[in-house]
Amino acid sequence: MKKTLYLTVLLAVSIALIFTGCGQSTTTNPEGEEIPFNYISTSEFRAMIDAGDLESGKIIAVCSQTEAEFAESSVPGAIVTHARPLETADDFAKLNPALEAINTSDAKVVILCPRGGSGATRPFEYFMENGVDTDRLLILQGGVEAFAIDYPDYVVTQ
């Protein structure tokens, strides 16, 4: 009985530590200051789409999904980069067309990735490091997967 309880507690603590590590909520700007990532809920993103903000350019959606992830479910109107995984200079260079669009606008930027994790936080940091004001950058909470679950009529498959 004690062994089972011990293993259960150990498992619970391990899972908590794993999810805490995956839930990074801050980054460091070029000046070395810690700043929070900005998140947007699926319902807030849907409201922006319904208001015509994506179509009119009031917001820019940047999709970092791989080709396979994009084919599974994607948001129409997003700038497609297929930048995942972001490991090499060539991977980050895939974000440059989106960066150019961002730099020619004052629109808010919603970063889309599969689950709202590093596929979005790394582009957030890249855009920040390249001069985009962090107040403009938003990460879709839960990513495209959560958006597809909450609003299946708002995503398409290829």
Image (tube, helix red, strand yellow):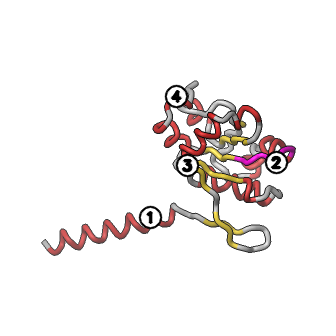
Find the magenta span and give its range. 104-109
Q: Mark 2 or mark 1, which is nearer to you?
A: 2
Q: Earlier in the sequence, mark 3 or mark 2?
A: 3
Q: Which of marks 4 and 3 is nearer the N terminus?
A: 3
Residue type for callout 2: Asp
* Mark 3 lies on residue: 41
The residue lying toward the viewer, choosing from 128 and 59, is 59
Q: Position of residue 121 (x, y in %)?
A: 64, 56
**Residue 30 located left or right of residue 13:** right
Query: Predominant secondary structure in magenta?
Result: loop
Residue type for callout 1: Ile
Q: Earlier in the sequence, mark 2 or mark 1?
A: 1
Crowding around mark 3 (Cα neighbors within 10 Å: few <14, some 14 to 19, many 20+) is some
Report if the CB atoms under discs 4 and 2 are less than 8 Å apart: no
**Residue 151 located left or right of residue 12:** right
Residue type for callout 3: Ser
Q: Estimate the spatial distance between the alpha carbons at disc 4 and disc 1, rounded to whole Å.
A: 33 Å
Q: Which mark is residue 153?
A: 4
Q: Residue 18 carries which label?
A: 1
* Mark 2 lies on residue: 106
